[in-house]
Each structure stands twice: as C-alpha cells, then as structure tokens.
Amino acid sequence: MTGVLAQAGSFFNMLFSVPVAYAAEEAAGEHASGIHVVLKAEEIGSLFGFPITNSLLMTWIVVALLIGFAVLFRRKIALVPGKLQAGIEMLFEGVLNYMSETLEDEKLARKFFPLIMTIFLFVLIANELAFLPGVGSILIEHMGESVPFLRAPAADLNLTLALAIISFLVIEITGVVVLGFFKYAGKYVNFSSPVNFVVGIIELLSNVGRLISFSFRLFGNVFAGEVMIAVAVFFVAYLLPVPLMAFEVFVGFIQAVVFSMLTLFFIKLSIMDPHGDEAH
C-alpha cells in the first residue's frame, strides 16, 4: 500500500509544483520511500563565474513576464478603453486612492505607487507561478545530482531578504528625506528623559527587526506550504493535495498583499513626526 501511495505521490509531484524530492533508502533489504526536504536553492549552472540557482532562474522568468506584460499593455492603451484596460485602470485607481488616504498626501502616494504595485505584482506572480506543472518537478543533472530545474522564488530566503532590504532602505530614506536627518534620528535617539530614551531604543530595535520579519514571513509561508503539499501528495495523493493547493494559491495572494501593505504602512510611520512634536 505504501508503494502505491508513493507512486501516486510521484505522479502528482510530476504534474504539479511540489519542489520536494523523493528519496529512497534501503533498509532491511527493502526500499522505504521518504521525503527529502531541501532548504536552500539548488545550483543548476553558472554565468561568468556566478552561480545560477533554480529559484534565481524562476525569478528571471517572473521579471520577464512582468516586463513583457507592461510593454504589451502599453502598446494597446487606447483613449476609449476596452474591458481589460478599464479593469486595470479601476484597480490602479483604487490602490492609488487607498495610498493617498493612508499617506495623507496624494503627491507622495503617486511617487510610491510604482514601488508598492511592483512589489505586489512581483510577489503575487512569483507565488502563483510556483503551482504550474513542472515547477519543482522537472529535474536536471548537475554535479552528478538530480535537482529541480525551477523552484518557487519566495522559497529561497535570499530573494525574500533582498525584497526586505529594498523595503527597509526605501522606508528609512523616505523618513530622512521628508523629516530631515536630525528630526528622523530623534525618533530613536531621544535624551529628553530616561523613558523617551528607552522607548527610542526599543523603536530602533523593532525597526531593524523589520528585516527579519519581512523576509522570514514570506519565506516561511511559501516554503511551509510547499512542504505541506509534498507531505499530502506522499501520504494522501488522491484526496488532500488539490484543496491544499487551492488554499496555498490564496495564501500566495495574501502574502503579496501583506508585504506591499506593510511597506506602505511603515512608510507612513517613517514620515510621521516624532513623539512630542505634534503639539509644536
């Protein structure tokens, strides 16, 4: 029975994106199937001496799709919009209005709209493309080992950390530019009283901690979802994987919303006056 389930799991693993390799171990003269989870992205080649991983290749595909869609959509923009153009315009206008209300500054919202929308679309497409057939299941030989040719970008901590660094730098630079260096630094270094000094240090630590929370939240949800689906495919191949995949599609959308919205909210916090300055 275990062999049948393993074969069925391998079949589903071939069709759907389950980037977890099945390993066979020989024990007591019998082959026992198991699940081998690979935490880091696997290298599939190199370019000018730089290693190319399967998650990096998938990231390039996502970027190419975004650029391709933007170019095609720009060429088809008309004064009398069709249904697709009208729907996208309504979506963008809704997001822009929400950003204007959040930042309380329409000019500032227009400046940050490309960044927030790009983060949302990139994370969304990267998460959803991970469920296409072949992602994580097409194997190639590299250095004598079989490794997946494609892997979900957000399942690589390097990508989520890079996105977190981008958001972090934008947030901090925005606070400095809008408030000024000394006024912004006053949020974290305040010698007016011992209480304000401690509060400032706590805010500074929580601010730096955003790098960890940003990167590990996205990475943890995507990677955990992949492992959960792989386990479901292995043990209950005919019943459980499909609803779990549907749930993970929804989770991928939520993670895109959360990452972009947190970036927006932290930008709002960075441009707010330090405590005690509101009354002046």
Image (cartoon, helix red, strand yellow):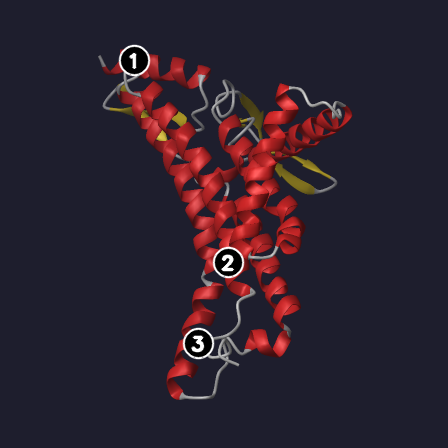
> In terms of secondary structure, where does tag 2 sit?
helix
Q: Nearer the viewer, residue 134 or 42?
A: 134
- Mark 1 or mark 2, which is nearer to you? 2
Seen at 63% across and 64% down, the residue is 173
Q: Which amino acid does the dot numbered 1 rest on?
A: Tyr
Badge 1: residue crowd in 10 Å (few <14, some 14–19, many ≥20): some
Seen at 59% across and 26% down, the residue is 87
Q: Tell me: residue 188, above or below residue 251.
A: below
How many numbered callouts? Answer: 3
- Position in image of residue 130 (x %, y %): 50, 28
Please tell me which of labels 1 and 2 falls first in the chain.
1
Seen at 47% across and 58% down, the residue is 210
Q: Real-space Cα distance between discs 2 and 3? A: 17 Å
Instruction: Locate residue 71 relative to residue 23 in the image: left or right.
Output: right
Q: Which amino acid does the dot numbered 3 rest on?
A: Ile
The residue where tag 2 is placed is 266
> Quarter-wise, where is residue 267 in the image?
bottom right
Q: Real-space Cα distance between discs 1 and 3? A: 53 Å
Q: Nearer the viewer, residue 27 or 250?
A: 250
The residue where tag 3 is placed is 201
Badge 2: residue crowd in 10 Å (few <14, some 14–19, many ≥20): some
The residue where tag 1 is placed is 238
Instruction: Locate residue 210 relative to residue 50 in the image: left or right.
Output: left
